[in-house]
Image (tube, rainbow, N blue to C red):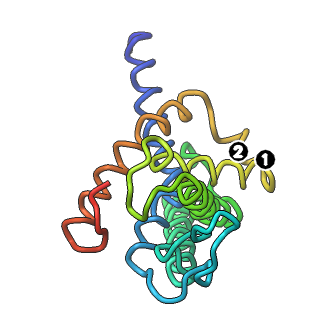
Amino acid sequence: MTLIDADIGYWIFSGLAALWIMIPAYVPNSAAALFGGGTPIDLGRTFSDGRRVFGDGKTYRGFLGGVLCGILVGLVEIWVASSFNLTALPHQTFLSVTLLSTGALLGDLVKSFLKRRLGKGRGESWFLADQYDLVIGSFLLILLIYPQWLFENITLPIAVWIIVMTPLLHRVVNIIGYYIGVKEVPW
């Protein structure tokens, strides 16, 4: 094996590791759309600017369903890693998957709050913010509560992969959600 082969293998493995880390953060947004509906988190209230705080698209049922699905997929990862001795993959814990899942949807809530302040409507595209809200939210929550996990598991190549793969996966999942009738717009 040459040095170039080793470097390519390292980058490919880093991509798989990035996906492994982010699955508990990627799942909640789709699950929230699937399980959403019901009482809005802002209870229909408006902010001082006269606009809704979050809007009708952010509901308790969607938030809780999304977080629970993210945690469940994370628990499956933990079980798979321990059952098949996958020690080379980043080490997920109950706390890490809970923070990734919760942080992803908290990031989405903050983005929705900011979108309303900018006068953007529900479902209106907001380039970059729509793609990276879940990454920023999940990483900030982990940084606040479980920083050692973040620094042990997020290397520079993994961070690069997360930055590259997030908008691609976001687009694909939203298109699928649109065609199966879960989302009103394909972005």
Q: Position of residue 174 (x, y in %)?
A: 31, 58
Q: Which residue is mark 2?
A: 150
Q: Position of residue 97 (x, y in %)?
A: 62, 62
Q: Which residue is mark 1?
A: 147
Who's the residue at 54% across and 88% down the image? 39
Query: Foreground: 62 or 99?
Result: 62
Quarter of the rendering occupied by the C terminus: bottom left
Amino acid at the residue labelled 1 = Pro
Q: How many marks?
A: 2
Q: Is residue 103 left or right of residue 185?
A: right
Who's the residue at 40% across and 73% down the image? 33
Q: Is residue 56 left or right of residue 146?
A: left
Compared with 64, 8 (above or below) is above
Q: Are dots 2 and 1 in contact, CB under 8 Å?
A: yes
Who's the residue at 50% across and 78% down the image? 62
Amino acid at the residue labelled 2 = Leu
Can you name the residue that lies furthest to the left here? 179
